[in-house]
Amino acid sequence: MTKKLTKDNDRRIYTMAEEKTSAAVLKMGLPVTLGMLFMVAYNLVDTYFVGLLHDDYQLAATNLAYPVMMIMIAVSGIAGNGGASYIARCIGADRKDEANHTLMIGFELILTAGIVITAFGIIFIDPIVKLLGAKDNTFDYTKDYVLIMFIGCIFTMGNYAVGQLLRSEGSTFYSMIGMIIGTITNIILDPLFIFTLKMEIKGAAIATVIGNAVGMFVMLGFYFSGKTILKPSLEYKHFDKNIIKEIMLVGIPHTFEQFFSTAAIIVSNNLAADYGELTVAAMGISNKIMTFGGYVYQGMAAGCQPLMGYNYGAKNFSRMKSLIMAGVIETSIIEICIMAAYGIFAPELIGIFSENSEVIQTGVRTLRAAMLMLPFVGATSISRNTFNAIGMPLYAFGITIVRQLVLYIPFLLIFNRLWQYSGLIFAQPVEEMVCMVFSMFLLMRVIKQQNN
């Protein structure tokens, strides 16, 4: 008979295996969410301090440069999300050595990808900046910011991926601590570099890179101090075909998910540019504020992912269903509260980042349209992360294809043509509502098949 787990044996395993589902979702999801909200601060802090320069073109440039960070995070997700999914399943199936091996291969993949992206970004910097939608008044500012991000991309990628790997074993608190310390570093350095050293937007980029570096090294410190379940060791540095396959099966589709999301932002920015660069600045502020709500549902879903992977590895399908329902309900309640706050305080929130009346007016209009998506996004994100957690990335990829390519980008183009800027800003709420129904139907159907 299997010995029943208790809190005294290992609290992290107890949470994933036996704790009440509503409590387990909160215990795993809230620390991840808090850590990811601090990641929002990387962009919000840059936007805030750059806004104090009273230069709306530099403000617009921070928004135009944002997809570059998303691409770095997307590539790091190959090792971070792919590795995390397989680690959680290995721990659930009591294959700790294989989990340790996966961790080391994940580290190696992060380092390799960082070197490649840095070289690519530096060589093709001008075409990349043009693709982002930068025009005459924003091109040089965007280039300054993006170039520095490429030079320090290993730290941005490492900060995200190492955090994901920590979460896979239930060490969400350590991941949160690393993100918080990195963000605080960024907050301290931003005014120093932007104003004291008079580096303006370049200073914001440098502060962001250093903040990510600090966060990454803090999280690595937990691994090498022996406080984690898994232990990095050169014993596991050798190539393993099966582990690489498992990482890639989840990691590559997840990376394409991020690429499609980035493509949608680039399309949106280019459409918004037709209404003027101040509109781009306003949309950028709204998007940055919306990332707060975005990281809430992403954090809750990421927190649920180890729970799903562990219980799938243990063949506990009934617990998986309960965890999914608890995650969807709790995430939706939190997002509705955030939506209400956005609706009430939209003028004040936009006004934090700009004093330009046109930017504030357009930003308020944009934020109040975008916030309508929040009640629907939690279910879609949890569905997608569950498929990644249980080693069925093609289903997660299918949700992304429907969400971004079948629905969102076509809606952006069609709605913008029919209703101009109003159509542009209401495209995503409509898309998210449709995608929620599709993703939940697909997930419940697959779990039912697995349980038969």
Image (cartoon, helix red, strand yellow):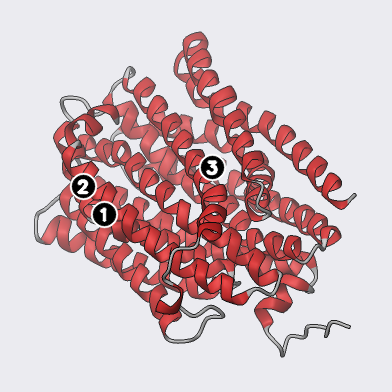
The residue singled out by tag 3 in the image is 253
Residue occupying the point 48% across, 39% down: 256
Q: Position of residue 139 (x, y in %)?
A: 17, 31
Residue 264's quadrant in the figure?
A: top left
Q: CA distance from mark 2 to mark 1?
A: 6 Å
State the residue in front, 313 or 434. 313
Q: Nearer the viewer, residue 38 or 446?
A: 446
- Please give left or right for residue 406 compared with residue 383 in the image: left
Q: Amino acid at mark 2?
A: Ala
Q: Position of residue 216 (x, y in %)?
A: 36, 68
Reading the image, the residue beneath label 1 is 115
**Whether residue 171 is situated above or below residue 164 in the rendered picture:** below
Would residue 82 appear left or right of 46 to someone viewing this image?
right
Of the numbered discs 3 and 1, the one sitting upstream in the chain is 1
Give the residue type that dot 3 points to.
Answer: Pro
Total numbered circles: 3
The residue that mark 2 highlights is 119
Q: Residue at x 11, y 53 (%)?
A: 199
The residue lying at 46 percent from left, 57 percent from top is: 79
Answer yes or no: do the residues labelled 3 and 2 have beta carbons within 8 Å? no
Q: Amino acid at mark 1?
A: Ile
Q: Quadrant of the N terminus?
A: bottom right
Most extreme residue toward the bottom is: 8
Q: Dot 2, crowdedness within 10 Å: few (<14), some or many (≥20)?
A: few
Q: Is residue 165 above or below residue 151?
A: below
